[in-house]
Image (cartoon, helix red, strand yellow):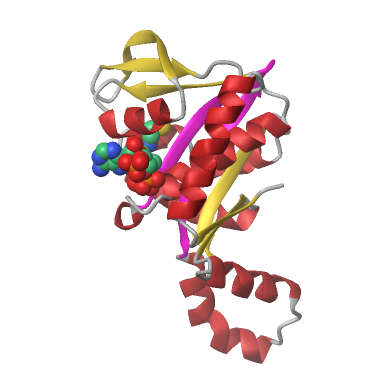
Amino acid sequence: MEAAHYVIRLMEQDDIPQVAQIDREAFPGEWVFRSQSAYRRDLGNSSVRYVVACKRGAMAEYRTQKTEKVSWFKRLFTHERAANVREDIVGFSGFWMMMREAHIIAIGVRDRCRRLGIGEGLLIATVELAQMCNANVVTLEVRASNEIAQRLYKKYGFQVTGRRPKYYSSNGEDAIIMSTDSIASMPFQASFQELRDDHARRHPELQLLIS
Ligand SMILES: CC(C)(COP(=O)(O)OP(=O)(O)OC[C@H]1O[C@@H](n2cnc3c(N)ncnc32)[C@H](O)[C@@H]1OP(=O)(O)O)[C@@H](O)C(=O)NCCC(=O)NCCS
């Protein structure tokens, strides 16, 4: 079996600067509502969950650095490596829980890492986390013009349930509201499992570590 290169895991405080950077890249015009301090607040909020996709090697190295007691001398010379490690988050997604609804805040992947199955992996992790939070449905808003994201969501059974006129203040664009059927229902579970297995077959280099 091919070695995993990317890992999807829960987001941590130290990830915030990179996540904010990806947010700015992926959502020009919207990211301004999600500042670094807003992310810090969200991580302390039990109704909010975020996951990140990162390079596996980078994560292992990062964890070693966090736990190991490093002398001032070594720190001086590992600064460069730490900076490189911090560049290795490639995508993120998050949702908040309202009653039994998991509402996706955003899913974003670095431009240079798109079309590698990472966005789909983040959506799978998001739905699985929503299931763990006892959500009944997953919902979201997406720009009417964002056909790429809508295609991803439709693949996972999201249906258009409404429209918010002029929702995006940057250009007055409408938002499409999309929602799943009950994620606990047998038909959803069966189709989700099939898609998840197919994604794992096509992307053995991507590992989900969220449970
Ligand atoms: C939407 C986004 C997260 C997809 O991430 P990604 O890692 O490139 O997507 P994946 O490689 O996992 O593709 C998964 C599915 O998305 C759809 N998709 C992704 N890129 C696509 C493209 N260029 N054209 C058509 N469909 C595309 C397809 O359905 C694809 O499934 P397939 O491989 O069976 O065709 C990414 O394009 C992004 O960050 N966009 C900017 C932010 C955004 O719009 N977020 C969503 C709104 S909340």
Whether residue 94 appears in this view of the structure is no
Query: Residue, x 54% and y 32% (percent of image)?
Result: 192
Counting every numbered tag in the picture gives 0
Q: Residue placed at 57% from the left, 21% from the top?
A: 187
Q: Residue at x 44, y 42 (%)?
A: 120
The secondary structure that dominates the magenta segment is strand
The residue at the far bottom in this view is 73
Q: What percent of the width, then of the height, locates residue 124? A: 54, 39
Question: Position of 132 compared to 127: left or right?
Answer: right
Q: Which residues are drawn in magenta?
A: 88-110
- Left/right of residue 141 with respect to residue 4 in the rendered view: left
Residue 18 seen in the figure: yes
Between 182 and 92, the one lying in front of the other is 182
- Residue 186, compared with residue 127, is above or below; it is above
Relative image position of residue 79 (x, y in whole percent): 53, 80
Q: Is residue 202 part of the magenta span, yes or no?
A: no
Seen at 42% across and 16% down, the residue is 159
Q: Nearer the viewer, residue 208 or 164?
A: 208
The image quadrant of residue 175 is top left
